[in-house]
Image (tube, rainbow, N blue to C red):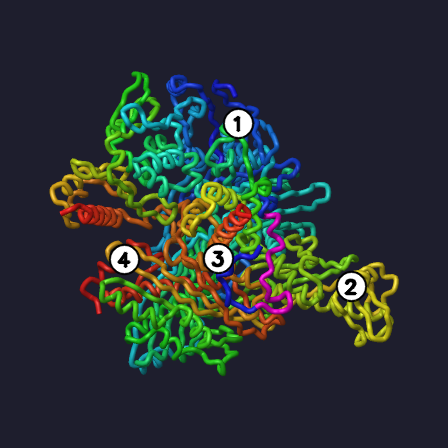
Amino acid sequence: MIPAAFDYAAPESAGAALEALRSHDNAVLLAGGHTLLTALKQRQSRPGLVVDLRNAGLGRLEVDGVGDLVIGARVTQQYLADFCAREGWPVLAEIGEKAGDPMIRARGTFVGALCAAEPGGDWAAGALALGAMVRVLSGEGEKTLDYADYLERKAEPHIVLEASIPAKLRAAPQGYTKVKHAAIGWSVASLAHVETEDGPRLAASGALERPRRLEAVEQVATASKVPDLPAIDDALSALTFTGDRYAPADWRRRRLALLVRDHLHTQSAKEPT
Amino acid sequence: MNAAPFSSTTKVKLTIDGHERSADLEPRDLLVIALREKYGATAPHIGCASGRCGACTVLLDGEPVKACMMLGVQAEGRSITTAAGLAGTRIGAALQAAFKACHGLQCGYCTPGMLAAAHGLLERNPAPSEDEVRQALRGNLCRCTGYQHILDAVLLAAESLREAQAA
Amino acid sequence: MKPENPYAGELAEPEGWVGRAVERLEDERLLTGAGRYVDDITLPGQLYAAFVRSPHPHAVFSQVDTMAASDAPGVHLCLTASDFDDLPHVKPNWILPRSTPRGRPILAKGRVRYVGEPIAVVIAESAAAARDAAELVEVDYDPRPFVLHQDEALGDSAPRVHEDMDNNVAATFTPGNGGFDEAASAAPFRTRFSLRNQRLVPFSIECRAVNADHDPASERMTLHIAHQLPHMARRMVAETIGFPENRLRVISPDVGGGFGPKMHIYQEEAVCALASMRLGRPVKWTERRSENVCNTTHGRDHAMSIDVAADEDGTLRALRIESRANIGAYMSSMGSGIPTINVGLFVMGVYEIPAVEVDIKCLYTHTPPVDAYRGAGRPEASYVIERTIDRVAHELGLDPAEVRRRNFLTEDQIPRRQPTGAMIDSGRYHHTLDEALERAGYERFRREQAEARERGELLGIGIAHYTESCGVGPGQVQKLVGFDRGGYESARVRMTSDGRAIVFSGSHSHGQGHVTTFAQIAADELGISPDRIEVIQGDTESVPQGVGTFNSRSVPVGGSAVKVAAGRVAERIHKLAAHLLQIKPEALIREGEVFGSDASNDTLTFAEVCHAAWTGHNVPADLGVGLEETEFYHPTAMSAPYGAHVAQVRIDGETGELELLRYIAVDDCGKVINPLLARGQVHGGLAQGIGQALWEDGMPEDDGSTILDTPVPRFDMLPRFETAHTVTESWTNPLGAKGLGEAGAIGAPPAIVNAAIDALWHRGVRELDMPLTPARILAALDAAKGHGA
């Protein structure tokens, strides 16, 4: 419950925060803190320096000139969910009702959840289904990456300044189905979906080692509107499933396959024949 | 507060239940530990190490947060309301009365956090459904009541607040 | 403010205070954050303790290096086992005859036997400094083979937990009247099956805490402990560390939930006391959750096999139960009694069974010690018999409700001592079951279930007609079973000069609301309202020697003590008032607060009489000065509350997910003192029982560690409970009460598992073990494919 001692800085710009991160070989970034604080309390994380973004701006939340949704690193999950409930990208509003609890959403940030990409993380699944991009500041300067690519290449000290959600999916049919773990309520098998003209974009959380887009499943779904369970299960076979005593990996896999099947059946029933 | 890194203790000013307070905090002092040990505000309790029990929930500038999930230094200049200060708010007073009427507490250990979380709900939603109450308070563990009397209490408080508003 | 009452019809409200849904008198403080729990108390010169704990379930070690820790900033003292010439052990005080008790060393010496066992302590200026320094302690562990499950603890090749023992058997117990083989072979039906009652982490939201303050000048020590039994805590600490009990004071202030584990003394209380003695400064230790899940006692953990014989109509003929109880690495204070006496006596439930044999073995394993957790043995007993009844009913194609009715003890058989030794004082089982089935719409549900089945949907209904045993006492009985504690409870009732009263009670609330219920009981005796009565508990220096709160004994035993003591005070008030008015006591008339008589116009107020008693200016010799009575109340016997619980579930056959649709609990705890608080007790018990049935599992992982986040029920996981009472008063105490605190935790597991199996029986599922995780249900369905009836 008592973290090991560390130094603390709250720089007044993202650039200064990056400098602080780079100046110390054991520095970590603090935004909403809902991943870091837990690790600090259990002394699983023992940073020498904690760099807090609270004075660094990055609070932007708006629809930009081209209609993309831009979400700064310090935008809390609740603020985002409320915004999306009014402005579009309804899957994010829905995740806002289903992720964590009100206190977690009040402090936890959307971008922080994307960076942590915890196995049971809800927001990362939504971001993957929506094709989110992230703007990253590192020693090499600023770069915009596809969020899915970002997850593949965790790099050098960096700061994700903001995430953006493409405008074209603002009003697309979308949603989030979540199966909760009994202990904490994190996801054990969840599915975010966005229906595009090119077919569904699906992303899963909970059952896998981290949230992932289900590309193989999307292909099966595009080929056959209502694939059967074995076909879906086959499309999941390349993924690595995790589990625990309450919800073992093989059950999570089955549960996810059922979520996919039920979702595709529901979608197919909605479409005019 | 200075933007330069610091490791030693630093003076942190905040407002607790309407009173301006200051104390020397180490960077690693969690807000809940700072409140309890350094500011002497023992209403928020510690029940877990993982941020999952909600016993430490307080209002930070009116919004419920888990005081174990932020550092004390992050609260610099902000306003904290604990169960001790809730009686001074319209919603807090209604909740306290309703918890008593409905037997919404037993050992009382989770109660300060439960009240703060419920305060946050009624602030946002003056007429919650049963399910909305359950969802809003799912971050607060209670091992005594089975939650039903707490549910009754929050619904009753909401009703009495609406009646008072209408009158 | 009156809540809209969804609870109408539970109980009628009486004239007096007892039986009324009075709002709690203790709530104000707790609602304003002014509760005072042990960790809230910081004393002048306060020091803090942090413990070094074993990461291994079994290891030997020769060195504990505390050099670096001792040199760390702010550190005052490091202690290990080698700092004690004669290392104290925390010994059990319920030691079953012929058992092999092994108590916990206050710090492990040369060998650790479970993950979390304390090895060293660091005392420092702050909790942070103590924790930092504790990390610097080095131990040269040599890990050894270990055994976690009772199934593996019995074999010859099993690693032994205590090297001075020939095997891991801590205790055995074999109640029953024998004759199983004969009766079973004569019966037309017989079946055998096994079940588990899994280990649970009790998880009070407040962890344990102690603040030990030894004053070198007076050689007195005060211990603030989060505890259910302050007087027993005093005795146990005194015994453990060899401190004079008359110079030891225990204060248990507000306690944030107990549920069993807070009625023992552990290593930390003893170590903090000894450290305070060495340092002459107060030493506080507040348990972290990560310590709570692995060093504070766990509950349950039985593996049972059942052999049962019956007639074709379901009439039970013979029952044999074999239970293997995992009691962990050491015998905790009640560790040998809970799995034996509290299980073995009650496995017959509310039924007449001609031949019963029970064989219970308690086994040491390399896991945290197991002891009482809400229900403490009776949940295990009720689970096995209530599951057995359903098993018999399903196999014979009979209605489980009907099979219960055919086997119930009838009113003319009660009071009764069952062949296992259980005492049943009162019961109208048909009446209570009918009430529960009526409320549950049992027949209608059965029709809906049949229709749903046609559509391929899985609905199930389960009944548990539990009984249990509350209000431990009288002491003579406890002696027979090696339970070295009192079977009484104390109460002292004192009037003050202003006509108010103080009730001192040896019971101790950790949420139950004694301040209110005991005030109600005293109020009826004294004829004043409860808000004029102050209830004092939790301080060994002001409260007469008491036993404390466990086993749902506070109302039947502690409440009876209050009633008796307050009754005697009322009698003295009456006599004194008559004396002061110079009339015969029989002529005295009381109207509200005023005493008078038909003989004259002279009157005295209630307060004036109290005032006169304490000035002592005019008191008769046979009454003496003051108005105060102390009662050490011994119940005639323990009482056997019971109830009929009904659960309705829906199971998704594809996912294995179970939805608890309704839960109906009709409990019979005899006289209900406060229906509002009684309902709260039932709700809380149900939540824990449902938690056990559906989610919770405290069994350590394969490496012996215990997970931090045991899935205790959250707000969005439980349905609304439907509760009611039947009232069959007990003759074992003057209140007619039977205890209710544990009822929900006892009834819910069998009701829910019975409902789940009821939903799946036709699909070929015969057994499901708790917790009923979706994965487990699905696995059972998969395994049963093709075996459906």
Question: Which residue was labeled with disc 4?
Answer: C652
Tag 3–tag 4 contact (CB < 8 Å):
no
Do dots 3 and 1 share one subunit?
no
Amino acid at the residue labelled 3? Gly
Instruction: Estimate the x, y position of residue C594 in percent, counting from the top left.
Output: 78, 66
Disc 3: which residue: C684
Q: Position of residue C697 (x, y in %)?
A: 38, 53
Which mark's residue is nearer the viewer, 3 or 1?
1
User: What chain letter is assigned to the residue under label 2?
Assistant: C
The secondary structure type at the circle numbered 3 is helix
The verdict on a common chain for dots 2 and 3 is yes
Give the residues in magenta: C13-30
Q: Residue at x 33, y 25 (%)?
A: A160
Q: Is residue C662 left or right of residue C426?
A: left
Label 1: chain letter? B
Give how far apart the Cα atoms at labels 3 and 1 are.
39 Å
Distance of mark 3 from mark 4, alpha carbons? Answer: 27 Å
Q: Is residue C403 left or right of residue C515?
A: left
Q: For the image shown, how many numbered marks are present on the structure?
A: 4
Residue A228 makes an appearance in the image = yes
Relative to C780, A16 lies left or right: right
- Check disc 2 and give the amino acid type: Phe
In the rendering, which numbered label is found on residue C606?
2
Residue kind at label 4, given as amino acid type:
Asp
Q: Residue at x 44, y 56 (%)?
A: C688
Magenta residues: mostly which secondary structure?
A: loop
- Helix or strand or loop: what does disc 2 sit on? helix
Q: Disc 3 or 4, which lies upstream in sequence?
A: 4
x, y percent for residue A178:
31, 45
